[in-house]
Image (cartoon, grey):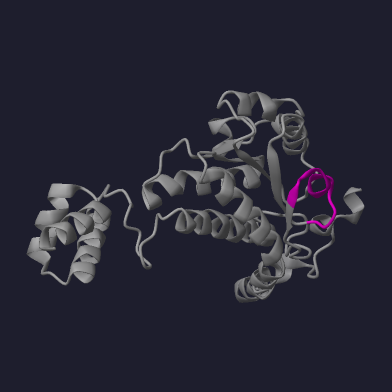
Amino acid sequence: MINNLTTEQTSDYNNLEEMSTFELLSNMNIEDKKVPNAVEKAIPQIEKLTDVIHAKMSKGGRLFYIGAGTSGRLGVLDASECPPTFGVSDNWIIGIIAGGDTALRKAIENAEDDTELAWKDLQEHNITDKDVLIGIAASGTTPYVIGGLQKAKQHQIITGCVTCNKDSPLSLEADLPVELIVGPEFVTGSTRMKAGTAQKLALNMISTTVMIKLGRVKGNKMVDMQLSNKKLVSRGVRMVMDDLNIDEELATKLLQKHKSVRKTIEAYKAEVK
């Protein structure tokens, strides 16, 4: 099976150690330009998965990501960015990596080869059939991820996947597969490169679209973002100024009072009616 995987095919480049810095960077960039096209071709698959997630989450369900290595880190990253960006609870979108949080910084030996571990990790969060599970694996062969999806399906949980090989074991296991076929990596088999970039783009698209459809964006603004630092407070002030057509001093005062861009805008409009 592994010899047939696009992600394992030999690079189109050779003798990399003989290339100049400019040649290395330029050739990587040539390869990276293929990523958006691969994602574009998968938009119909991404759409189907996203609509199911939205339907489940609009009824109180949650979204889970599971993965190992780079794929696992990307899931945790996407999940961890949603609370500050959209003001949602940190248990609404949950990223789980094989080997636990320690694996975010250090490789945990054999964690991805355990077919039972993912389900144990998911049970700690009381996953149910109200939720959706997405398995992330560039190769589409990771036992941790495949085992997690198999167990989830036994419990009538809808499953999706994000992978970079066509008709992989993971894709065949998932109810709603997303396949991002980016071709061989610049460094043979290094899926932290094009494959990882494609997965990151797809996860961004999925979570952002779901949050927009759930009303977490107004116009084009992150009105529910957490005002957790000076930069975000300043951004919030500008949002309030633009939406209400008021000066900076009043916008700042109102935002300090209501602690939320959305609440500030709604309260002000209610008062001036």
User: In front: 258, or 60?
Assistant: 60
Quarter of the image holding residue 157? top right
Q: Estimate the x, y position of residue 248 in percent, counting from the top left.
A: 12, 66
Q: Would you say residue 117 is visible in this rendering?
A: yes
Q: Residue at x 46, y 44 (%)?
A: 80
- Horizontal side, residue 228 vs residue 165: left or right: left
In this rendering, the answer to whether 55 lies above or below 18 is above
Q: Would you say residue 136 is visible in this rendering?
A: no
Q: Is residue 101 magenta?
A: no
- Horizontal side, residue 195 vs residue 55: left or right: right
Q: Estimate the x, y position of residue 166 in percent, counting from the top left.
A: 83, 57
- Horizontal side, residue 214 vs residue 54: left or right: left
Q: Estimate the x, y position of residue 41 in percent, counting from the top left.
A: 72, 70
Quadrant of the image containing the C terminus: bottom left
Numbered-mark total: 0
Quarter of the image holding residue 129? top right
In this rendering, the answer to whether 178 lies above or below 56 is below
User: In front: 247, or 80?
Assistant: 247
For the magenta stretch, what is the residue range?
165-176
In this rendering, the answer to whether 60 lies above or below 178 is above
Q: Residue at x 7, y 63 (%)?
A: 249
Q: Estimate the x, y position of residue 33 in percent, counting from the top left.
A: 65, 74
Q: Residue at x 76, y 46 (%)?
A: 175
